[in-house]
Structure formats: structure tokens, C-alpha cells
Image: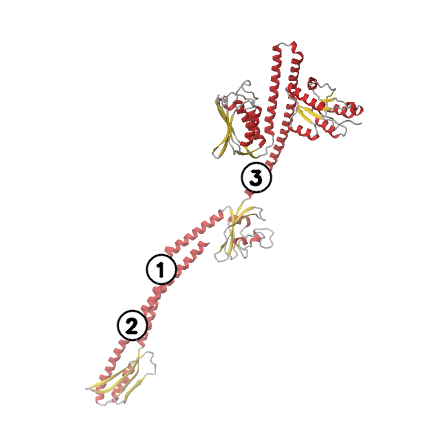
Amino acid sequence: MAGKNILLVEDNQDDIDLTIRALRKSNILNEIIVKKDGEEALAYLFKEVPADIEKIPAVILLDINMPKVNGIEVLKQIKENERTKHIPVVMLTTSKEEKDLFDSYNLGCNSYIRKPVDFNQFADAVKGVGLYWLVLNEPLPHHE
Amino acid sequence: MNQQSQRQSSRNRHTRTVVSFAGLILLFLFIADLLIVSGQRKMLQENARNEMQKELEVIGTFSIEAMLKNDYATVRNFAELFASQHTEIRSLKTVTPNNFAISDFTSSERAKNPLQMKHEVEFAGKRMLVVEMVKDLVSVEEIMNRLTFQLIIVSLLLAGVFGAVQWYLLRKMSILPLEKELIESHTILLTVLDNLEMAVYVADMETYEIIYVNKRLKDQFGDVRGKICWQTLQAGQSGPCPFCVNNHLLSPDGTPTGVYNWEFQNTVTDVWNLSYCQAIRWLDGRMVRLDTALDISERKHTEDEIRKLNLELEQRVSERTRELEAANKELEAFSYSISHDLRSPLRSIDGFSQAVVEDYGDKLDENGKNYLNRIRAATQRMGRLIDDILKLSRVTRAEMQKQEVDLGQLAEAIMEEIRGSDAGRRVEVRIQQGMTAEGDPNLLNAMLTNLLGNAWKFTGKTSEPRIEFGCIVKDNKNIYFVKDNGAGFDMAYANKLFGAFQRLHSESEFAGTGIGLATVQRIIRRHGGRIWAEGVVNQGSTFYFTLE
């Protein structure tokens, strides 16, 4: 069976910790792979995953504003690639700029969540995302 | 020119008057002369007749004695002697009653003005002799001729004197002043024409010969009278100028159509002219073009300058626009980073405060937990502030798309939403229908959401809350208002209402960031309108606004 791991692409350590905390508080215990910028995330998806099919994430939580390669560019590459385009991508970002929303949906993101300042609200949002994509949603089976 | 011909004709009229007056006098004199002459002639002839009668009687008396003696010789001698002594006698006959001619004298000269008389001599009732005489009244004729001649001379002299006197009087009384006036007005006209800032010339419309030029034209082209206009006043023309306006000056039937003005650049001087052309009839009857040309080079120059300045201005505006666009881009980048970078640390503060409460709650007393909760409340409030600032900046940046908006319907929809989010409250809402305005629907929506939201919020502690949205017309302008009977405000602080982050109520009393009315004001200003408010503490407030 394909991995049920979560790929979290986020450059802010605080946000990483809080996201993981929120997921764990919602009893989502799947493995969480953290990549701290777009470059690392792309390297993981296009180098590590092909070698080990188990590493295919069930969902990608993607921040937009990151050093080197930003989230929009990462999303673009994921959705342009045959291997990765079916992986659900949830934009998890602080930005509510219309342009970011527009670009993200245009490139085929599956959800767009704006991180609230209130941790309780944030936790609720992450819980919802995790439950939906990891439990409710039926992913495409992987063939290799 | 016209005036001059008038003067000319008036002078002709005077001459005619003088001549006809003199002629009339002459006619009268001639009639008088005729009467005098015929009277005189009659009198002279009567005198001559009387004299002749006496002479005949003398001859008769003298002849009676001789006839009684039948001395015919004496009678004949006497008669012939008499005839020879009177040069005027052309013939003298003495005849007996039985037709025997005693004497018969006939002069060789022919009578020019003959007078014939017959005298029968009687003695004691018996006819004795008949004397016939023909006389040439030479002296009468001579006298008459002399008289006629003298009368004609006198008459002519009189008529001449009268005519001269009349001519002199007329001249003194009307012709001279007219001429003086004519010369004066002519001088004035020429002076004015010469002093004009305009070049003036007159040219024959058929031959193109220049008839008159004023000083200004003379200064530019010399005295070109007698020359052809298209050869002298324009350059490089091989015939009448293709831009000649002659055909604009006459109607098809050849009558002048009035002034035709046009702008052109002279081909000799390169000077821009505003030319007023008109066809007029010259004194001698030919049709001429009177051209009065104003030098408008300066105006043209100014127009060019203005065009150039406008172009520069446009360039500057587009430069500024580019700069402004760049500044806007920067601002966008700035608000992007605010929304992202400023919120992230807040989330950390909030998140980890919560983590402390959750994970280490047992090690904290109530006070410690309270502090952490206050940290969280403050962070969340700052998060809201950041969101509102972003909203405010978006209002300023967003591109306006104006269209007709039904404000009443819009307000209804907004109230529906507000009621839905605060279902526990009952508020009397009155919204006037049929209020349409020109504006950006999204911005107007944000504006009304703020105003109606405020009214809803500030009537939260009122027992019978009422909200009214309507419109009044003043000076043909729609003034919209949102009225509530809520907390109101002190008019002393009215000027602070629309400043960003300005609040008239504490956070604990009524929640808010103090951005709402600043946003409203920006939206209304972007629509070219104005907003102001009236309020009384604890009685309510009314917000008035206009839209362009």
C-alpha cells in the first residue's frame, strides 16, 4: 500500500512545530516529512520518491513564501509532472493575496488554507485538512 | 471708397442745379426780350407809319394847287425831288384818278422791310390825286437788330452773373464743407489703414492687379501697386494662387458674399496670417478683393508651444503614472510581506502560548494562565488589525469598475447577512427603495457593510434598536444617510471619526479596530463623494454621504 505520509513544506520552524502539534492533537499520527524550502521538496519528490514508492506522500501541505523556490513554483512542477500531478496539494499559507489564490487554483492546487493567527482556529483547520485528505479522501492507487 | 463716390455724385448734382437754374433765368430773360422786341417793333412801325402818312399828306397838300392848274410837271418834279431827298423811299407814284401816272419813282435798291401806303388827295369833295409810296424801314430794322443784340448780351450777362453767384453760394455753403469732410475722412482712413497692425491691400478680382496697399504691406513688399498679386505677394506661383479665395467671395450671380476669413502661411514671408477677405465694388465699377491680413505668427507660435507643452505634460504624466504604478507594485509587495511576515510571528506567539497552557498548565497558577490568555488575546487582536490594514490598502489599490448599483437592494442583502451572523437580536431596519447610484459594486458593498455593521454594532445596547438607510435630495444632489439610535458619539470628536485606528469607544464596550470608517471614507472619496456624521451620545448617530 502506498505511504500515508504527509509532506510538509515550510521554512518557518515555529510553523513546522505548530503544524505538527496541531496534527498530532487531532490524532493524525501519520509520518510527517518536513522539507524547509521548495528546492528540498522538489528533490524529495523527484529523487527520493522514485527510488522508494513508499515515500509518496498522501498529501502535501505547501507554504507559498519560501526561500529559493517558492510554493507556487513547487506546485507548478508537481502538477506538470505525470508522476506527481495526482498527489493532493493543500496550500497552507499566511498569504491571502488574490494573486496567490488565483495562481494556486490555476495551477491545480486541491485546497487553499490561510493559517489563522488564533492557534485554536489553526488547529481546527489542520485537523480538517488531515482528516479529509488522509481519512475521507480515496487516493488514486499507485502503480509502478 | 463708397463715401467718395457719394461726394462725387453730390457735386454733380450741384452742377446740374446751377446750370438748370441759370438756364431757367436765361429762358425768362429771353421771353422778356421777345416781348420787349415785339413791342418796340410795333411802336417803331407805328411811328414810321405816322411819319409816312404826314409825308404823303405834305406831298398831297403841295400837289393840290398844281393839280388845280393841271401843272403835272410841277407835281412830278416835286415828287421826284422828294423821293430823291428821302433815302428810305423805294418807290413813289402819283396817279390821277383816271389812272394816269404823273410820276413814278422806283429805287434800284430792293426793300428789305417794305411799308406801302396809299393816300388819296381830295379837294372840295373831288378826288384829285392818288399818291402811293413804298418805304424801306431800314432804320427800324437797324434799331431792332441793335436792340435784340443788346438784350441778348444783357440777358446772357445776367444769367451768367446769377449762375456764378449761385455757384459761389452753393460752393460756400455745401460743396466746400463736403469736400473738406471728404478730405478729412479720406486722410483719417488712410492714416488708420497705415497704422493698422494688419497688412491691407486691394486687388482687381479679374486682372489680379494690386490697386491699393497700406503702409504695413508696403514695408513688407514695397509699393507694389500696379503689379499682379500672385506674382508679388506670393512666391513660386505660375498663375493665380491655387489657394486664392476669390471664388469664396462672390455668389454665382456675382454679388459679394461678405467677409471670408481664413488662416494661411505666406509663401514669401513665412508669416502666418489670419486674412479677412471681402469682394467690394471699386469706384470705377470693377469688382475688387479687399484683403486685411493679421499677423498671427505669435499665436501660432504659442499654439505650437502649448502643443509641445501638452506633449511634455503627457510624457510627464505617463512617467508619473509609471512611477506611481511602480510605487503601487512596491506597496503591493509591502502589504504582501506584512500579511505574511507580520502574521507568522503572531501565530507562533499564540500557538506556543496555547502550548504552554496545554502542556504545562499544571505548573501554572490561575494568574499565569490568565497572563498567557491575555498574550493570546493581544496577538489575535493584532492579527485582526493587520487584516484590516490590508483591507484598507486594498480599497485604495483596487481598480474601480463603475456601473449602476441599486443601493437599497445592496443594503438589504448586507442586512440579511448581518442578521444571519447575529441571529439573537431584533432590530427594526428601514431601507428606502429605488436608490440607484453609479459606482464600483464591490467597494460600495464594503462601504455599506461597514456603515450598516457599525449601526448594528452600536445599537447593541439600545432597548428598541432602529436602523434607517435612506436618501434626501439637496441642491439637486443625492445625500444618502445611515441613521441609528445607538450609542452615538460626542460631536466634539467628530473630526476623529474617519481617521485610521481612531476609536471613540473602548474595545471592551464595542469591539473594533478603528479601520472601518477610514475604509468607508476612502471608498467614498474614490467615488468623488464626501462623508460626514452627526451624533448625540446615547441617542444615536447619522452618517451622511454623497457619491459623484
Q: CA distance from mark 1 to mark 2?
A: 32 Å
Q: Chain of mark 2?
A: B
- First in sequence: mark 3 vs mark 1: 1
Q: Residue furthest left?
A: B124
Q: Chain of mark 1?
A: B
| Residue at 37% across, 63% down | B20
Decide if residue B185 is on the left or right side of residue B426. left
Q: Amino acid at mark 1?
A: Gln
Does residue A97 show up? Answer: yes
Pointer 2 residue:
B40
Check disc 1: other Cα within 10 Å, few if <14, some if 14-19, many if 20+. Answer: some
Check disc 3: other Cα within 10 Å, few if <14, some if 14-19, many if 20+. Answer: few
Q: Is residue B214 above or below residue B406?
A: below
Q: Chain of mark 3?
A: B
Pointer 3 residue:
B306
Q: CA distance from mark 2 to mark 3?
A: 100 Å
In which quadrant is the C terminus of chain A drawn?
top right
- First in sequence: mark 2 vs mark 3: 2
Q: Amino acid at mark 3?
A: Ile
Q: Nearer the viewer, mark 2 or mark 3?
A: 3
- Residue B525 position, x and y percent, is 55, 30
Q: Secondary structure at mark 2?
A: helix
> Do marks 3 and 1 both belong to one polypeptide chain?
yes
Discs 3, 1 touching: Cβ within 8 Å: no
Q: CA distance from mark 3 to mark 1?
A: 69 Å
- Residue B242 position, x and y percent, is 59, 53
Pointer 1 residue:
B166
